[in-house]
Image: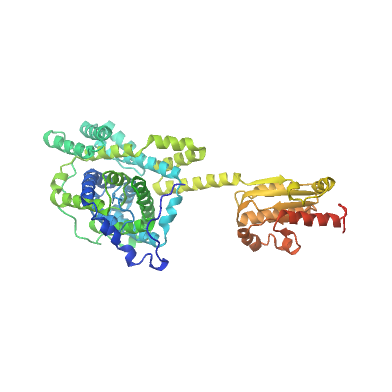
Amino acid sequence: MVAIGRGGGRPTAPGARFGMRRLLPAAEDLRAMGRSPRRDLTAGLTVAVVALPLALGFGVSSGLGAAAGLATAVVAGVLAALFGGSATQVSGPTGAMTVVIVPIVAVHGPSGVLTVGLMAGLILLAMAVLGVGRLMRYVPASVVEGFTFGIACVIALQQFPLALGVHADGERVLAVAGNAVAAFVATPHWPEIGVAAAVAALALVGARLRPGVPFSLVGVVLATVVALVAPLDLRLIGALPAGLPAPSLAFLDPSTLGALLPAAAAVAALAALESLLSAQVADGLSVGDRHDPDRELVGQGLANLVAPLFGGVPATGAIARTAVNVRAGATSRLAALSHAVLLAGVVYLAAWTVALVPVAALAGVLLATAVRMVDVRSLWSMARATRADAAVLVLTAVATVAVDLIWAIGIGLLTAGVLALRAVARQARLEQVGLADDLPPGDAEREHALLAQHIVAFRLDGPLFFAAAHRFLVELPGIVDVAVVILRLSHVTTVDASGALALRDAIAALERRGVVVYVSGVRDGHHRPFDALDVLTRLRAEGRVFGTTPQAIAAARQRLQADGVLAGPA
């Protein structure tokens, strides 16, 4: 399992944990913003340069336009930086969220997306109150890797219509990409594909040669210049409003809330997963920083609650931008905050320049982003780890591309859970053990032999739960030609209702064959399921449950003496 959410900071009283003080920036966070302002402002500028073409590209890809992407980067960037649980997290529109938004736009239109974002914000706040953030640590690494690879594929496929300069529809991204290729073959138009390929190549090759230079932005600027001076008939972003719109709820239609609730839940789940994963990346790149997962959900909830009021799409923590922020030297929230303020400056002061950017250039930026999301070495290592990890990774990736992101996560988690249970169940063993170590010293050798002829001791090792319980039903009742069976439970690690019932059925089957059953070594934490299901109640009343195995052997000896099998007093 990968620890996606690791809590940090001082513990708080349960009653005050999510009060007003929990929602407001901590005094320590505010003080930290003044410790290294030059480094943080430099990091914020670096991230803003990287984030600008991504915000434009994801806005266009979502179907709501470049203005929506910029509004999200500004509003969500400010709120998540102030109220989130990570000091270096950068939030805004992301490729994973765009994948979820596109079908919502197709069915419910832009107003539906804004409503879904608003509802997702409320759901994220509820998740924070319930402490869901700390549960996200149980997402397996193989699910995360498969999910990330699948998202990269979907982002790349989404760019086909823009990169090819065609219009294409379809219910699934594979259908959209296929229709785009068919439309291009029918009426090819080479300038768009040339611009997209050139920008993507520049971004990928440049990042490898000079990682510190924002080649994505350089590519967009060069493509814009080419579009201005050459008669290539490229589709441009078009006019943008010079500023953010006034906050409004005009998009909200109460009658659609019920129909949009499943989509809002999916968006909230994705926002939580991606944001906490991004915060974990920030923890790994920083020294001594640890995010608060539940407070991070608070920040993302507020960001998604407010961004739609300004026409913004749902937002999450952005892994790539967060990594750039940390590597650029960010030490506090000032870096992410200044990145959002700088993007706001673009909105208010330079919107006219953004309007001249070819959309094919943005497609090239996102194609390069999709390629950089894929870590081939990490994928190969995960696939070689175990067959179970490989199966979960492949299944999650395929489901992400072919089905749906949220379904993909569910399928991945379910598959990983089933395989993990299978592996745990295989650890359960029923092993026959000798009596010599548990007999008191001084017993004659003949006594040992006689006891061994009539008494068999079995040690149950590992979990006694639903995934492993059938083993005991199959193996125990098959014992023959003995008078007494001693079940040693001291090595049982866990017990659930299914395991307790299986043990009860096995004991009953033995007794029907005339075998007397004794039980020893029940751990203190395991009495509850046994008592609740009356597994050992009758045996305890008849004096056949003991704390140690020697006590059980002594009772079995007395039973055999009473039956005349062993010499001794009856």
Query: Where does the image place residue 149, in percent across and percent down from the top left?
Result: 38, 40
Residue 361, by quadrant, is top left
Is 519 left or right of 301, judged from the image as shown? Answer: right
Residue 82 drawn at (x, y percent):
27, 57
At 24% from the left edge and 43% from the top edge, which residue is drawn?
A: 50
- Image location of residue 350, percent across then percent down: 14, 48
How many labels, in total? 0
In which quadrant is the C terminus drawn? bottom right
Residue 137 as seen in the image, left or right of residue 218: right
Visible in this render: residue 511?
A: no
Q: Residue at x 12, y 37 (%)?
A: 228
- Above or below, 555 relative to 428: below
Residue in the image at 30% along x and 63% along y? 24
- Between 15 and 304, the one lying in front of the other is 15
Q: Residue at x 16, y 51 (%)?
A: 345
Q: Nearer the viewer, residue 475 or 231?
A: 475
Display colour scheme: rainbow
In the foreground, 212 or 123: 212
Outermost residue on the front side: it is: 442
Place of residue 382 in the rendered image (x, y in percent of width and height, measured from the top left): 45, 38
Q: Nearer the viewer, residue 570 or 2?
A: 570
Residue 497 visible, this angle: yes
Residue reaching furthest left?
229
* 229 relative to 398 in the view: left or right: left
Q: Quadrant of residue 113?
A: bottom left
